[in-house]
Image (spheres, rainbow, N blue to C red):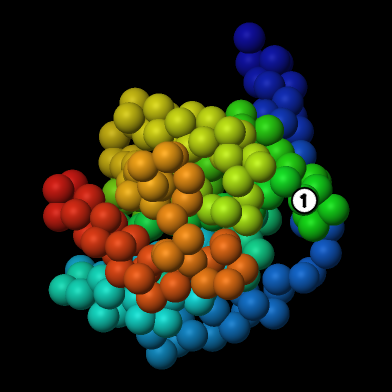
Amino acid sequence: MMRFVPLLLILLISCSPLKKYPLKSDKWENDIKFLESNDLEEACVEDCILFLGSSSIRLWKEIESDMSPYKVVKRGYGGAHFYDLIHYTKRLVKNHKPRAIAVFVANDITGKNNNSWYGDLKPKEVLQLFKFFTKEVKSIHGDIPIFAIETTPTISRWSVWDKISKTNDLIKDYTIRKENLNYITTRLDFLDSKGYPREKYFVNDKLHLNKSGYKLWSKIIKNNFKEKL
């Protein structure tokens, strides 16, 4: 039996998302180094909640006041996908000792295949990347509570909302089955009575949140923290 163990390890390594989705450029390396340098002056410790993710996290200028009374530190970089975040996860979390980690990544399915290395991923592929992301976090922080903030319905990416919504559902179902994995659903609050994204919550690109959008987002997120932390 033991002679088959090395072969099994080779198969597991070869199937790792790190191998399947290698970094194809150092596009975000300077961003990651900048965030690491910020850790020297602003680390997330004690009762702090660490926010990771893409541009919606990076551009959240009023996150501290919006999320009050929760202490928060954000480590987002613009354009993040789960297929590149998995390569940076340990670097982004290792210098912190947070109470919990929240993650929002919304670029693996956009409807614009020419804007990413691998094109739009399938919902099941995004789920596998999310699973690996949580394993990377737990390899540093053990059984820390992780909150997955679902991808918001937007006018800009409405043509692929069916795929995004399916991805949301898969991740939600997975978190339900796992201890200390939590899911924050937001879609109903951002859709109008006809089931279409409310334009009043977005800036001109119809993708990123405006002040009102962030206020609503933070209210939903805080309600989940209050219930589960």
| Total count of labels | 1
Q: Give the residue at the far bottom of this rendering.
A: 41
Residue 41, image x, y percentages: 41, 90
Classify residue 188 as left or right of residue 65. right
Front residue of 3/197: it is: 197
Q: Is residue 221 left or right of residue 213?
A: left
Instruction: For residue 65, say whether it is visible.
Output: yes
What residue appears at the point 44 percent right and 73 percent down from the top-left corner?
210
* Closest to the observer, 103 or 88: 103
Q: Is residue 167 above or below residue 83?
A: above
Can I make out residue 140 in this image?
A: no
Residue drawn at the location 33% of the way across and 49% of the way down: 189
Q: Which residue is mark 1?
A: 112
Closest to the observer, 166 or 5: 166
- Expressed as whole percent of the image width and height from the top left, the position of residue 132 reads 55, 41
* Secondary structure state at the residue bearing disc 1: loop
Q: Which residue appears at 61% of the width and 29% of the height?
A: 124
Look at the picture and state if 99 lies above or below 162. below
Q: Is residue 110 above or below residue 51?
A: above
Furthest-front residue in this view: 194
Vertical comparison of 50 with 61: above or below: above
Q: Position of residue 43 (x, y in %)?
A: 37, 79
| Residue 111 in picture, x, y percent from top left | 72, 46
- 36 on left or right of 198: right
Q: Residue at point 20% right, 75% down? A: 68
Where, quadrant-wise, is the N terminus in this rendering? top right
Q: Quadrant of residue 47?
A: bottom left
What amino acid type should be assigned to the residue bearing mark 1?
Answer: Lys
Front residue of this view, candidates 121 and 92: 121
